[in-house]
């Protein structure tokens, strides 16, 4: 007996709703492209933050990446330009992915603009629109998430899950022996997020350093 076909509207509801908080970055660009190609994910938007580059450039890169793949329907909300306590010096890793974050390719400016809404406000809005359904994937410092919690203290209960690329667990850090770059970028924000009561999955460099992209996997990525 043939299985019943899934209606398009039902398939849409089954997809995991995702917001990527990002500081692109070639690494983040790859993550965004994979999310866009996944049939299991619905990308609700991108929020930008400093890290690999300053926030303004992160926004420009996010808009450029979406334009490059014809997904200008996805909103980009610009995030904080400063750490949550504002006095902490920004640590920009331009030496990793180039001064533009994308390998110094000098891409033309994007034609699109970010939405007229802060990243924190956008995160709170999505959590309210889809309570318990939204996963935030945080690929940079956690400033925007901390500001979302300050904006709406109930945000940790409304968000489905926060997946954090950050931390060094039982291994040395990559900034100094005790710290990993994304947490080190705004430790006060990290403290707010980790103690908020939200459902958090943290993926530290103890995990990412074990990931190897094989030739077979690279070919699969190339087909995307």
Image: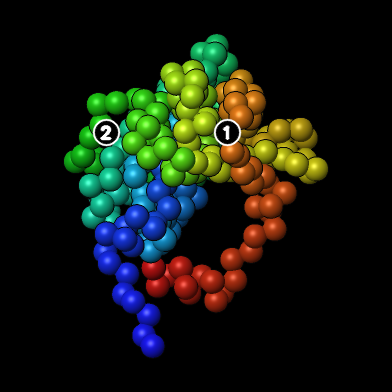
Earlier sequence position, callout 2 versus callout 1: 2
Mark 2 vs 1: CB contact within 8 A: no
Residue 117 position, x and y percent, is: 29, 26
- Asked whether residue 156 is in view, the answer is yes
Q: Residue furthest top?
A: 87
Helix, strand or loop under label 1:
loop
Helix, strand or loop under label 2:
loop
Q: Decide which of 9, 211 is in the foreground and name it.
A: 9
Q: Residue furthest left?
A: 111
For residue 88, above or below residue 46? above
Residue to which mark 1 is pinned: 198
Q: Decide which of 222, 193 is in the foreground and name it.
A: 193
Residue 31 position, x and y percent, is: 46, 53
Q: Residue furthest bottom?
A: 1
Residue 34 position, x and y percent, is: 43, 59
Q: Decide which of 110, 169 is in the foreground and name it.
A: 169
Q: Image quadrant of residue 169?
A: top right
> Going 69% across and 52% down the picture, which residue do you hit?
207
Residue to which mark 2 is pinned: 114
Residue 93 position, x and y percent, is: 54, 35
> Going 46% across and 40% down the picture, which residue do you hit?
132
> Going 37% across and 40% down the picture, which residue do you hit?
130
For marks 2 and 1, give the one nearer the viewer.
1
Quarter of the image where the C terminus is located: bottom left
Q: Is residue 169 left or right of residue 115?
A: right
Alpha carbon distance from label 2 to label 1: 27 Å
Q: Residue furthest front?
A: 1
- Asked whether residue 190 is in view, the answer is no
Q: Is residue 32 left or right of residue 172?
A: left
């Amino acid at each position: 007996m043939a299985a019943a076909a899934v209606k398009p509207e039902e398939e849409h509801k089954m997809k995991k709703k995702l917001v990527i908080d990002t500081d692109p970055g070639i690494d983040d660009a790859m993550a965004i492209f994979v999310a866009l190609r996944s049939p299991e994910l619905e990308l609700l938007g991108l929020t930008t933050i400093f890290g690999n580059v300053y926030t303004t450039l992160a926004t420009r890169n996010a808009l450029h990446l979406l334009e490059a793949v014809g997904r200008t329907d996805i909103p980009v909300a610009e995030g904080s330009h400063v750490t949550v306590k504002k006095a902490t010096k920004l640590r920009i890793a331009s030496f990793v992915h180039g001064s533009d974050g994308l390998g110094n390719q000098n891409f033309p400016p994007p034609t699109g603009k970010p939405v007229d809404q802060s990243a924190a406000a956008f995160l709170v809005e999505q959590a309210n629109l889809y309570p318990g359904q939204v996963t935030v994937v945080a690929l940079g410092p956690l400033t925007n998430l901390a500001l979302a919690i300050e904006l709406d203290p109930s945000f940790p209960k409304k968000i489905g899950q926060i997946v954090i690329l950050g931390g060094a667990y039982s291994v040395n850090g990559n900034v100094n022996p005790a710290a990993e770059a994304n947490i080190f970028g705004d430790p006060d924000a990290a403290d707010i997020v980790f103690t908020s009561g939200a459902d958090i999955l943290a993926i530290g460099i103890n995990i990412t350093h074990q990931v190897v992209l094989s030739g077979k996997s690279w070919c699969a990525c190339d087909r995307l």
